[in-house]
Amino acid sequence: MMTERETLFLEQAKFFLERVREERGVDNLSEFQALLKRRPFPIEPVIVENYLDMQKEERTALLKHYDTWGMAYFVIQNPEVPVPGRHPLFEIAEQLKDDLNLHYPLDHPHDSHAEAIKRFGIADSTFKVYNLPKPVNGPQYREIAETNEPSEAHSDGLGMAGAVETSIMYGDSPPMFGGYTFFYDTLSLGAVLAQQDYEAFQSLFLPDAMISLRPRGKGAIKVVTPVLYINESGKPQTAYRRPCGEYYLSWRENCPPLDRAHTFLQEHTEAFCYGSFFVSLRAKGHGCLVNNRRMSHGRTGFIDGQSPSQTRCLSRKWFMTSKHHSKFKHVPGTNVHPKYARLFPEYFGPEQMEGRWLYNQKEDRNVRVA
């Protein structure tokens, strides 16, 4: 039995479908059904001859891919040309910032992680994703981004309140084998489910549909959220993720429609499943711009070689929706549209959207620490 608050909160579902249809420029939601019949495929890159001065045709192609696929895969032809003190992905972002709202990079504390500096040199304002072997003597805990293990489908930025608009990933060096990055258009999957089972689709908007928990470490947080929602800017957004590594997922119990929705999403977000596509960041200068509001992505496991040129290192930068969100925070809230957020202030109220919080395992609650 739904409460009155929940019934009002679920009204987002119909507006969500309208927004998705408008964004994709389709007349009928039935057009999304073809997604499930599409075989997985390696997406074609946009070739960039000179990342320091991209040509109009290159920029146009990147924007078209981003709009069509929810991401753009690029291959730079001159990755060995350096810019002192500046990572190449910032040069790309600078030339696309007005088109993709790349004005607000997040200065994340992990951008200057001591171990990354030890391995890769002076911090360059990007977060390094690589395999950190477990020490013989010392802490054994590692976050999934510090391993060579598979990373399941997810949206970036747990604890960032859903404010990561675009994620840029850039390959500094490839592994000896593996490390395929795969993508799912989760908003379109929602539209498909709405056609097949509207009740299940609507249940994904429940305020407590999913609980994402990172129980320990420097990023410990517990986030209660809908899987799909209308964000603070009135746009459709996903918060979907699968359990993986240090991430634990639980779904609202005793809700058969949500069980069906969960099963649907699990089936259609497997690695290399129908409806997905993938890239191989197999050389320096390969990278992606990802619409984090729309897409979920993951990675297969990889094997590093003996030399640095066969040791996977990926640089990542998050670009936020606004200047307000570009100041680092670590919160349990989600950027649900104010019309709906005010229905559940315990999850989405202003106090849940600011500061730095850490999850306390003993008390099973988030505690604000700053």
Image (cartoon, rainbow, N blue to C red):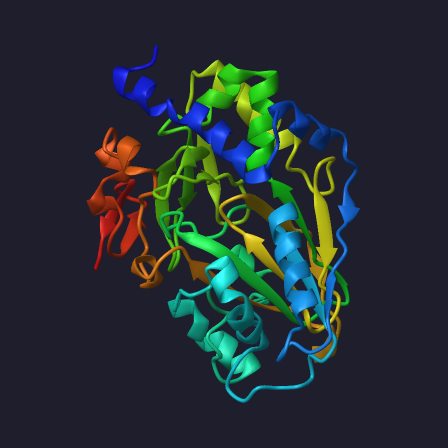
**Position of 39 compared to 187: left or right?**
right
Residue at (69%, 66%) from the top-left corner? 57
Which residue occupies the foreground of this view, 179 or 6?
6
The residue lying toward the viewer, choosing from 218 and 170, is 170
The residue that appears at 53% across and 43% down in the rendered structure is: 294
Q: Against 312, is 266 above or below?
A: above
Tell me how many marks there are.
0
How far across and down, in percent of the image, does residue 326 sit? 35, 62
Residue at (62% x, 68% y) in the render: 170
Q: In the shown orientation, is residue 241 left or right of residue 60?
A: left
Q: Nearer the viewer, residue 148 or 171?
A: 171
x, y percent for residue 267: 65, 30
Tell me the quadrant of the picture where the C terminus can be found. Answer: bottom left
87 relative to 198, above or below = below
Residue that extends furthest to the top in the rendered view of this protein: 1
- For the N terminus, the quadrant is top left
Q: Identify whether 91 is placed above or below 267.
A: below
Q: Is 246 left, or right, of 70 in this rendering?
A: left
Does residue 102 show up?
A: yes
| Residue nearest the observer in this picture, 323 or 300 | 323
Residue 151 in sight? no
Residue 51 percent location from the top left of the image: 65, 76
